[in-house]
Amino acid sequence: MLTGGKMLHIGLLIALLSMSGPEWSECYEDTFCIEAEDAGNRVDVYVRSLVDWDVTLSMDMELANMQADQQLPQVHSVSSQQRFKALTLKVKDISRSWSFRYDLKWMTGDFKARHAPGVVYELPFGHGVDVLVGQGFHGTETHHGKYAIDFDLPEGTPVRAAREGVVIDVVEGYKKGGVHPAMKIRANYVKIRHEDGTIAQYVHLRHLGAEVAVGDRIRTGELIGYSGNTGFSTGPHLHFEVFSLNKDLTRRTIPITFQTARRGVVHLQEGLYYRRPSSQLTSR
Ligand SMILES: [Zn+2]
């Protein structure tokens, strides 16, 4: 009944830049690069994305004999392999030496993403079964402050996309589950980015239980993997949440609704059973 997985992805890096030539760059986890160009009396700092999805960066700086043309720390979302100028550092006194140092944090997701109004999700499993919501929004076990849902699914249940999108992250190498704190980073999962920039995360999949790869475009109802019990978990279930980011890079989960048989479009309630409407299509 517990959440788990690499729910946060923050890098904290410090780089001391002493440019030996007019151009300099440093790349991070094959995700983005910070690039700088020395124009004599100023340095232009660029961010270049290496991936097809959104990353939010927060950049702070320590400056010696320099002044930034933007307020610090700066928060940007960068997407789809774009490159843009983040800021310019002006040299105050060109006759003296200058330097800058930056602190960087980042996380997958776009802090500017807003959930599209009126979007209704499909239950992330197949037809013909009633599935118990073991823990709902703000559940007291592990969903404090979170709009997350735990579906009680036996291990190996096919998990289907609740909404269409593009796969941006897959982890499936973990084998075990348990309630030791060390298990929190050992959940298998799939993350799917929706068109509005929000991200769905399907957590605790079984070992090698993902049936999709990063970059795959997924339709609603399509098989994406098999449920399991990996990571921080008291028993087999699927943890599901949809989120975007806050400006401080914390996760903001979203109170989504589902289409259900018998009860219509609802916020799912802990302790109730739900079934997929028979009219909904699934594939694969
Ligand atoms: Zn959960």
Image (cartoon, rainbow, N blue to C red):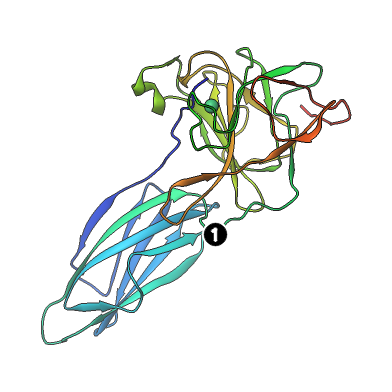
Figure quadrant of residue 150: top right
| Nearest the eye: 246 or 42 | 246
Side of 24 relative to 156 (left or right): left
> Which residue is depicted at the point 75% across and 32% down?
221
> Which residue is depicted at the point 35% across and 62% down?
34
Callout 1 environment at 10 Å: few (<14), some (14 to 19), or many (20+)?
some
> Which residue is depicted at the point 32% across and 56% down?
104
The answer to whether 231 is drawn above or below residue 39 in the figure is above
Figure quadrant of residue 35: bottom left
**Residue at mark 1:** 112
| Nearest the eye: 127 or 168 | 127
Image x and y of residue 279, in percent: 89, 30
The answer to whether 142 is drawn above or below residue 162 in the figure is above
> Which residue is depicted at the point 49% across and 60% down?
78
Name, please, the residue furthest toward the right.
279
Label 1: state its secondary structure: loop
Image x and y of residue 81, in percent: 51, 59
Side of 93 relative to 239 (left or right): left
Image x and y of residue 168, in percent: 55, 42
Image x and y of residue 118, in percent: 75, 49
| Nearest the eye: 199 or 118 | 118
Side of 98 relative to 221 (left or right): left
| Nearest the eye: 127 or 223 | 127
